[in-house]
Image (cartoon, rainbow, N blue to C red):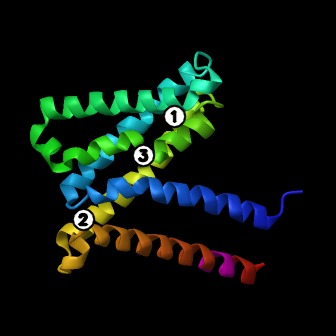
Amino acid sequence: MVTENAIQREWSGNNLILVLGIGPLLVGVTTFNAAVVMAIIFALTLLIMALVIPLLRNLIPLELRLSMILTCAVTVVTIIHLLLQAFFYEYSLLTGMYSNLVAVNCLLLVCAEEEWLSTTVPASLKQAMLLSMGVCILLVLIGAVREYSPLHLLRQAPGAFLLLASVIAGAQWLAARGKQISSVSA
């Protein structure tokens, strides 16, 4: 029997991985424009990976699974980065080397390992869309606050993590508040 504590531990573990995975993206998001570019790079990479990995899952031996996922991620990010440099050079300068960190981002690896190898292409694309929308909103929000904030601390690298912690705390507060309201009305 699955207990509520077991579900909470699993949920917390997955969220910890997601939060650690978004860290490299936050460092490069110092302005609104950089956030939009990074969000687009992340979303494109996630969607392409969600399409490619399920199609290749039967061709990937179990022993090479993680290496192949990482190789696919590096290839996709490299192609996107080269296209960005070729057609939108000024935007590629906004993200610098941080766009390449998407390739080793554990969000991609976790999604690919846990979901995309065991689901169909439409299901993995749906999950990738939802995840990329959430990350894109978060990146743009943090980038805008960092750019327009009068606090110098928020413009530095630790400021991104303070903002992320604030967003997580706010989301948890809203979730707890929603539980309280639903338990009172029941």
The kind of residue tagged 3 is Asn
Dividing the picture into quadrants, the one containing residue 113 is: top right
Query: Relative to the observer, which residue lies in front, 66 or 152?
Result: 66
Quadrant, the N terminus: bottom right
SS type, badge 2? helix
Query: Relative to the observer, which residue lies in front, 143 or 71?
Result: 71
Dividing the picture into quadrants, the one containing residue 139 is: bottom left
SS type, badge 3? loop
Q: Position of residue 167 (x, y in %)?
A: 43, 71
Main secondary-structure element of the magenta-colored stretch: helix
Above or below: residue 41 compared with residue 58: below
Q: Which residue is mark 3?
A: 105
Q: Which residue is mark 1?
A: 125
Crowd band around label 2 with a 10 angstrom C-alpha radius: few (<14), some (14–19), many (20+): some
Q: Residue furthest front?
A: 63
Q: Relative to residue 140, is residue 9 drawn left or right?
A: right
- Marks 2 and 1, the one that precedes in the sequence: 1
Q: Which residue is mark 2?
A: 144
Crowd band around label 3 with a 10 angstrom C-alpha radius: few (<14), some (14–19), many (20+): many
The kind of residue tagged 1 is Leu
Res. 33 in view: yes
> Gap in Å between the C-alphas at discs 3 and 2?
22 Å
Magenta region, residue range: 177-181
Q: Relative to residue 142, is residue 14 drawn left or right?
A: right
Q: Relative to residue 78, is residue 62 drawn left or right?
A: right
**Residue 79's mark?**
none
